[in-house]
Amino acid sequence: MPANVETMMYVREKPWHGLGTMVEEAPVSADALRLAGLDWTVRQEPVFDGEGRIIRGYRANVRDSDGSVLGIVGERYRVVQNVDAFSFTDGLIGGSVRYETAGSLREGRQIWLLAKMPERMVAGDEVEPYLCFTNSHDGSGGIKVCMTPIRVVCNNTLNLALGSARRIWTLRHTENVHDRLDEARSCLFRANEYMTGLAEYAERAARLRMMDEDIRDILNELFPVTEKSTEREKANAERCKTEFMVCYYAPDIEKFRGTAWGVINAASDLVTHSMPHRNTRNYAANNWGRIMDGHAIMDKTVALCMGR
């Protein structure tokens, strides 16, 4: 199945793979759980060897809706049910949470939720903050919660690592997992704090002037060429620099041109929308994962701009 999507729901705009159930209005958690095909639970069963003997120290995570084995995990692994994931996200944001998309990947081994928060103003622009929750049922990874702000005018992500507020929070499936979820809800992750920190950061960046030579130096750092670079590597570097400048001179960045915030937004446009040099089958899904975690080009651009 394209993009490894098993089931999902989405609001209005069809995703790149064209799969899932479309809804006109973002639903609350109870409806999103059903529409996304996530209204199932996971139970743990013993694992047996070829002679019918129990293999100690391991459990099978089994989906109750169809009996499929999602993964073999250690005995200390604790399941976080899909309904608990929605409950956790509801508790983090508060109020009547609406979900833009949710679903399962790799035949139910991984699930995700994307909840939309109230719009905020960042450097004079409307920004839509989203809270993303991912969880695996096969033991391949833990729980991850992250903020993904989207600049409305250009649909660019603004995933900046801030020293003042946390954007990503992770948790392993250890025996105290549910206690840790409560801990995260109460003190470790505060979505509104991140958005406040982002707004303050953007204001500072919008006041920091960037000359043409500064941008040239940044591009040389982002896309370096050495004496050992092949002709193809040199051509790719020049192409990336050209694409960056096309983004930098886009109309939506005009009011920030000549500032660090304009350069950062150009980098965001580049990694959010520009096509890869090799457009592989899973590029869109993989790039979304990189943007969620923090894209290397974005991180380096921010460091180069704000370190000057």
Image: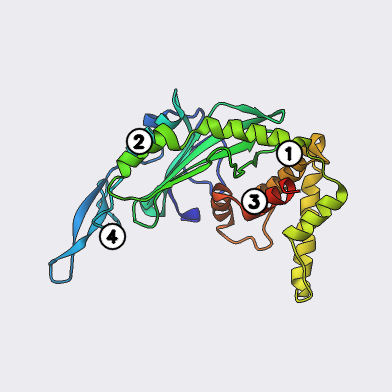
Q: Amino acid at mark 4?
A: Ile
Q: Quadrant of residue 242?
A: bottom right
CB within 8 Å, label 3 to label 4: no
Measured in 3D between alpha carbons, the distance from the residue under mark 3 to the one under mark 1, in whole angstroms, is 14 Å
Residue occupied by mark 3: 299
CA distance for labels 3 and 4:
36 Å
Tag 2 secondary structure: helix
State which tag comes first along the sequence, 3 or 2.
2
Q: Residue at x 67, y 48 (%)?
A: 273
Find the distance from the CA under tag 3 to the CA under tag 2: 30 Å
Q: Position of residue 119 (x, y in %)?
A: 60, 27
Colour pattern: rainbow
Q: Residue at x 87, y 49 (%)?
A: 212
Disc 1 marks a residue whose amino acid type is: Ala
Check contact, mark 2 vs mark 4: CB within 8 A. no
x and y percentages locating residue 58 in the rendered image: 23, 60
Read off the residue under disc 1. Answer: 205
* Pointer 3 with pointer 2, Cβ within 8 A: no
Which mark is first along the chain, 1 or 2?
2
Q: Residue furthest top?
A: 95
Residue 54, which numbered label?
none
Q: Are dots 4 and 1 in contact, CB under 8 Å?
A: no
Q: CA distance from mark 2 to mark 4?
A: 26 Å
Return the disc, 3 or 1, that comes first in the chain's sequence.
Answer: 1
Disc 3 versus disc 4: nearer the observer: 3
What crowding class fits label 2: few (fewer than 14 Cα within 10 Å), some (14-19), or many (20 or more)?
some
**Residue bearing mark 2:** 182
